[in-house]
Amino acid sequence: DTVRRTNRISSIKVGEGMLGRVVDTLGNPIDGKGPITGDLYEMPLERKAPGENDYVQVAAHEAQSSFAFETINFINDISSASQGIIHYRMGVEIGSDTTFYLDSLQLNYQTPCAPVTESTIEISPNPVSTHLNVVIENPSSANYNLAIYNSAGQRVYNNSGNILPGRNLYPVNTTGWSQGMYAVVVSIDGKKKFTRQILLRR
């Protein structure tokens, strides 16, 4: 038996349920005999990770073969896999006697990097007139030192202590300072993290 078709077939369905049926260009029945039933099929997703000798099924999709187009999504957790090339392949199993592979891909898996834990330091405004705001954001508790020097290298401000995790604001009163350039230096746990020049003007 054959499948009679009208116009052009853009997708061919499979299965015995298609025999003798008349379909349109998308494979939908137009002969008045009702919906087309097809064979059950399964699409296994197989993976071979670094250090593994053979493919292992990690997911599967099961449906009937009476479809024209279908979107299939697979999710596979690889957090426990070793670094390297991971091979995937997708197969189709129809009934108990037909198996073939549709597609394959390779994934270059690298262990995710550790999160960045650097300090963030901001100063404003610049230029400054009467009050300078210094914001120190740190991921954990630490010792800090905030020092400000004039253009002659003299330290005109110094503040030290323990900084808490998160965002910390340190206001500096610059009233009475001479106009000119100053250097703001911030150290965390004894290491210089930030140096910025500011302009003081009235």
Image (cartoon, grey):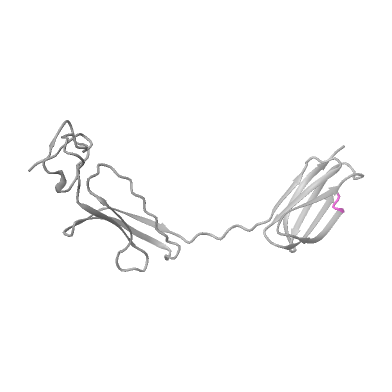
Return the residue found at the far left: 1
Name the image quarter holding residue 100: bottom left
Asked if the stretch drawn in magenta spans residue 98, the answer is no
| Left or right of 50 in this view: 185 | right
**Residue 19 at x, y = what percent?**
12, 44
Instruction: Please tell me which residue lies in front, 153 or 102.
Output: 102
Which quadrant holds residue 24? top left
Where, quadrant-wise, is the C terminus in this rendering? top right
Say which of 56 and 33 sits in front.
33
Q: Residue at x 15, y 32 (%)?
A: 6
Question: Which residues make up the magenta segment?
Answer: 152-156
Name the outermost residue toward the right.
176
Magenta stretch contains residue 155: yes
Most foreground residue, 147 or 37:
37
Q: Which quadrant holds residue 61?
A: bottom left
Determine whether 193 is above or below 71 in the image.
below
**Residue 154: percent from left, percent from top:** 87, 53
Residue located 29% across and 66% down the image: 54
**Dominant secondary structure of the residues highlighted in magenta in the image:** loop
